[in-house]
Protein backbone atom coordinates (compact mmCIF):
# COMPACT_ATOMS: atom_id res chain seq x y z
CA UNK A 1 0.00 0.00 0.00
CA UNK A 2 2.78 2.21 0.57
CA UNK A 3 4.26 1.37 -2.81
CA UNK A 4 5.74 3.95 -5.05
CA UNK A 5 3.34 5.12 -7.62
CA UNK A 6 4.63 5.88 -11.04
CA UNK A 7 4.27 9.39 -12.19
CA UNK A 8 2.04 9.74 -15.17
CA UNK A 9 2.69 12.57 -17.54
CA UNK A 10 -0.32 13.73 -19.36
CA UNK A 11 -0.24 12.90 -23.04
CA UNK A 12 -1.08 15.51 -25.53
CA UNK A 13 -4.28 14.85 -27.11
CA UNK A 14 -4.39 14.58 -30.83
CA UNK A 15 -7.33 16.84 -30.93
CA UNK A 16 -5.61 19.67 -29.18
CA UNK A 17 -2.45 19.81 -31.28
CA UNK A 18 -3.13 20.55 -34.90
CA UNK A 19 -0.55 18.78 -37.02
CA UNK A 20 0.00 19.51 -40.61
CA UNK A 21 0.14 16.42 -42.74
CA UNK A 22 3.63 16.40 -44.19
CA UNK A 23 4.05 14.50 -47.41
CA UNK A 24 7.06 12.19 -47.37
CA UNK A 25 9.97 13.67 -49.23
CA UNK A 26 10.96 12.03 -52.43
CA UNK A 27 14.51 11.88 -53.59
CA UNK A 28 15.41 13.41 -56.92
CA UNK A 29 15.62 10.02 -58.65
CA UNK A 30 12.15 9.09 -57.47
CA UNK A 31 10.72 12.32 -58.75
CA UNK A 32 11.98 11.67 -62.29
CA UNK A 33 10.27 9.41 -64.73
CA UNK A 34 10.73 5.68 -63.85
CA UNK A 35 11.24 4.92 -67.54
CA UNK A 36 14.19 7.28 -67.59
CA UNK A 37 15.80 5.30 -64.76
CA UNK A 38 15.37 2.04 -66.66
CA UNK A 39 16.72 3.65 -69.82
CA UNK A 40 19.79 4.93 -67.98
CA UNK A 41 20.40 1.52 -66.39
CA UNK A 42 20.03 -0.23 -69.73
CA UNK A 43 22.36 2.27 -71.39
CA UNK A 44 25.04 1.70 -68.75
CA UNK A 45 24.72 -2.07 -69.13
CA UNK A 46 24.97 -1.74 -72.89
CA UNK A 47 28.08 0.45 -72.63
CA UNK A 48 29.78 -1.99 -70.25
CA UNK A 49 28.95 -4.92 -72.52
CA UNK A 50 30.30 -3.04 -75.54
CA UNK A 51 33.57 -2.32 -73.71
CA UNK A 52 33.86 -5.97 -72.71
CA UNK A 53 33.21 -7.17 -76.28
CA UNK A 54 35.80 -4.77 -77.68
CA UNK A 55 38.35 -6.06 -75.13
CA UNK A 56 37.52 -9.69 -75.95
CA UNK A 57 37.77 -9.05 -79.69
CA UNK A 58 41.13 -7.31 -79.38
CA UNK A 59 42.43 -10.18 -77.23
CA UNK A 60 41.32 -12.70 -79.87
CA UNK A 61 42.98 -10.68 -82.62
CA UNK A 62 46.23 -10.59 -80.65
CA UNK A 63 46.10 -14.33 -79.92
CA UNK A 64 45.34 -15.41 -83.51
CA UNK A 65 49.01 -15.45 -84.77
CA UNK A 66 50.06 -17.44 -81.72
CA UNK A 67 47.25 -19.91 -82.37
CA UNK A 68 48.35 -20.37 -85.99
CA UNK A 69 51.97 -20.93 -84.93
CA UNK A 70 50.89 -23.55 -82.40
CA UNK A 71 48.74 -25.27 -85.04
CA UNK A 72 51.71 -25.44 -87.44
CA UNK A 73 53.93 -26.92 -84.73
CA UNK A 74 51.22 -29.43 -83.91
CA UNK A 75 51.01 -30.52 -87.55
CA UNK A 76 54.80 -30.92 -87.71
CA UNK A 77 54.79 -32.97 -84.52
CA UNK A 78 51.96 -35.15 -85.81
CA UNK A 79 53.90 -35.78 -89.03
CA UNK A 80 56.96 -36.78 -86.97
CA UNK A 81 54.80 -39.02 -84.78
CA UNK A 82 53.38 -40.77 -87.85
CA UNK A 83 56.89 -41.26 -89.27
CA UNK A 84 58.17 -42.59 -85.96
CA UNK A 85 55.14 -44.85 -85.61
CA UNK A 86 56.00 -46.43 -88.97
CA UNK A 87 59.58 -47.03 -87.84
CA UNK A 88 58.36 -48.50 -84.54
CA UNK A 89 56.01 -50.87 -86.35
CA UNK A 90 58.85 -51.99 -88.65
CA UNK A 91 61.16 -52.51 -85.67
CA UNK A 92 58.49 -54.52 -83.85
CA UNK A 93 57.92 -56.79 -86.82
CA UNK A 94 61.71 -57.27 -87.20
CA UNK A 95 62.03 -57.97 -83.49
CA UNK A 96 59.20 -60.50 -83.58
CA UNK A 97 60.74 -62.16 -86.62
CA UNK A 98 64.26 -62.28 -85.14
CA UNK A 99 63.06 -63.89 -81.93
CA UNK A 100 60.51 -66.23 -83.50
CA UNK A 101 61.76 -69.84 -83.07
CA UNK A 102 60.22 -70.86 -86.39
CA UNK A 103 62.20 -68.20 -88.27
CA UNK A 104 65.52 -68.70 -86.45
CA UNK A 105 67.17 -70.70 -89.28
CA UNK A 106 66.23 -68.28 -92.03
CA UNK A 107 67.35 -65.28 -89.95
CA UNK A 108 70.71 -66.91 -89.20
CA UNK A 109 71.20 -67.62 -92.92
CA UNK A 110 70.42 -63.99 -93.78
CA UNK A 111 72.78 -62.63 -91.14
CA UNK A 112 75.73 -65.01 -91.72
CA UNK A 113 75.47 -65.62 -95.49
CA UNK A 114 75.79 -69.34 -94.87
CA UNK A 115 73.62 -71.90 -96.58
CA UNK A 116 72.00 -74.84 -94.86
CA UNK A 117 73.82 -78.03 -96.00
CA UNK A 118 70.51 -79.70 -96.73
CA UNK A 119 69.43 -76.87 -98.98
CA UNK A 120 70.20 -77.21 -102.66
CA UNK A 121 71.22 -74.13 -104.56
CA UNK A 122 69.04 -73.19 -107.49
CA UNK A 123 70.74 -71.49 -110.42
CA UNK A 124 68.58 -69.94 -113.11
CA UNK A 125 70.00 -69.78 -116.60
CA UNK A 126 68.55 -68.37 -119.74
CA UNK A 127 67.95 -70.94 -122.39
CA UNK A 128 69.61 -70.21 -125.69
CA UNK A 129 67.18 -70.43 -128.54
CA UNK A 130 67.98 -70.06 -132.21
CA UNK A 131 65.71 -67.05 -132.49
CA UNK A 132 67.61 -65.28 -129.77
CA UNK A 133 70.92 -65.96 -131.52
CA UNK A 134 69.68 -64.52 -134.79
CA UNK A 135 68.47 -61.36 -133.20
CA UNK A 136 71.76 -60.87 -131.36
CA UNK A 137 73.99 -61.38 -134.42
CA UNK A 138 74.90 -58.32 -136.41
CA UNK A 139 74.30 -58.29 -140.13
CA UNK A 140 77.38 -58.90 -142.21
CA UNK A 141 78.58 -56.01 -144.20
CA UNK A 142 80.07 -56.48 -147.69
CA UNK A 143 83.20 -54.52 -148.40
Image (cartoon, rainbow, N blue to C red):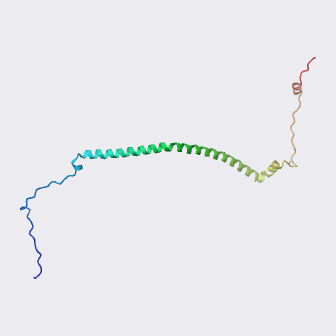
Query: At which x and y percent is residue 124?
Result: 86, 38
Query: At which x and y percent is residue 9?
Result: 10, 70
Point out the residue furthest to the left here: 16
At 61% from the left and 44% from the top, the residue drawn is: 76
At 67% from the left and 46% from the top, the residue drawn is: 86
Point out the residue furthest to the top here: 143
At 27% from the left and 47% from the top, the residue drawn is: 37
Q: Is residue 51 left or right of residue 13?
A: right
Q: Is residue 40 left or right of residue 2?
A: right
Query: At which x and y percent is residue 132?
Result: 87, 27
Q: Nearer the viewer, residue 50 or 102?
A: 50
Q: How many numbered marks, from 0 up? A: 0
Q: Is residue 40 left or right of residue 25?
A: right
Q: Nearer the viewer, residue 142 or 54?
A: 54
- Report the quarter where the N terminus lies: bottom left
Query: At which x and y percent is residue 24?
Result: 17, 54
Q: Nearer the viewer, residue 143 or 47?
A: 47
Amino acid sequence: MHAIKPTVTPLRSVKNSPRVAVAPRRSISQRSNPHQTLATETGVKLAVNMVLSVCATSALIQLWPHYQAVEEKLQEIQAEVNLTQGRVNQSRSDFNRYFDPNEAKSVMQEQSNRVDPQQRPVILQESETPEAEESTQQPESKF
